[in-house]
Structures are given as C-alpha cells and as structure tokens.
Image (cartoon, grey):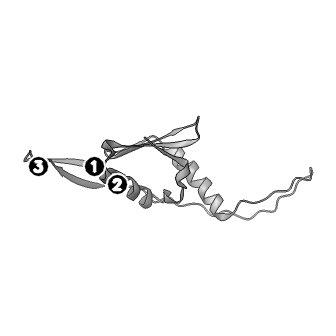
C-alpha cells in the first residue's frame, strides 16, 4: 500500500490517505484452436490486441466497484462504459488514477471505454 501524507498549511497535523496497490493483471495466453462448423460459418479469431482488450475489460468489470481515497470506478451497463469519479477533481488524484491503471495493467483499455464524472 502507498500511504500519502497530506498536510493542510493551516493545520499542523498530518492526514494519512491509504491507496491500495493494484495487483498486476496477467492476461492468460490463448490456445489457437481449429474451428469447424457444420453450418458453413466462418470463425474469425480476434487479433491479439482485441483479445487482450476484451479480457482486460471483463476482468476490470468483475472487480468493480473500486473505491479509493482518490477515485472510484464503477460500470454502467446502460452505456457499456466504466464510470470514473475523480475525488475533488484534482490533477493529483487524476495522476493517482493514471498510475493505478498503469500499475494494474489496465492501461491497455482504450479511453473510449471510460466516462469521467
């Protein structure tokens, strides 16, 4: 865990904010399988990047809601996107969110899957 110390210049006491450290996501490797169909359907295997993107979206969706002292992430099924609320709308909290996404391995999810409120 990262412990950030926030100090209000008017106060002499320190406030401690605990931000959980993410566990790096490991995308499982997929096995190439031959696909046979009696119906004549043609199976087109997704590209590696599309597979990784889809797997990461599903994995993050399974872990929500995520709430920290700097941000919260939820999923809105109506719009099919992650809803991110940055606390106090500060640049520092935005950076904490970006660092969390990077460290967790979710940075590969394209920005169009996120809505910021």
Q: Which structural element holds mark 1?
A: strand
Picture disc at residue 96: 2
| Residue toward you, 48 or 79 | 79
Determine whether, in the image, residue 97 is placed left or right of residue 112: left
x then y, percent, for residue 49: 63, 63
Gap in angstroms between the C-alphas marked 3 and 1: 20 Å
| Residue toward you, 35 or 97 | 97
- Name the image quarter holding residue 78: top right
Whichever of labels 2 and 1 marks the residue nearer the N terminus, that label is 1
Image quadrant where one finds the N terminus: bottom left
Whichever of labels 3 and 1 marks the residue nearer the N terminus, that label is 3
Q: Which structural element holds mark 2?
A: helix
Residue topped by disc 3: 9
x then y, percent, for residue 84: 44, 44
Please report contact status of discs 3 and 1: CB closer than 8 Å, yes or no: no
> Which of the two marks, 2 or 1, is nearer to us in this view?
2
Picture disc at residue 18: 1
Is residue 71 shown above or below 46? above
Give me the residue at 32% from left, 50% from top.
93
């Amino acid at each position: 865990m990262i412990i950030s110390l926030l100090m209000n210049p008017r106060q002499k006491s320190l406030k401690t904010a605990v931000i959980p450290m993410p566990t790096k996501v490991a995308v499982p490797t997929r096995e190439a399988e031959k696909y046979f169909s009696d119906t004549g359907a043609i199976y087109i295997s997704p590209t590696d990047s599309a597979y990784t993107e889809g797997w990461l979206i599903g994995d993050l969706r399974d872990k929500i809601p995520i709430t920290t002292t700097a941000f919260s992430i939820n999923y809105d099924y109506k719009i099919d996107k992650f809803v991110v609320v940055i606390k106090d709308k500060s640049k520092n909290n935005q950076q904490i969110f970006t660092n969390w996404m990077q460290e967790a391995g979710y940075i590969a999810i394209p920005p169009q899957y996120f809505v910021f409120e």
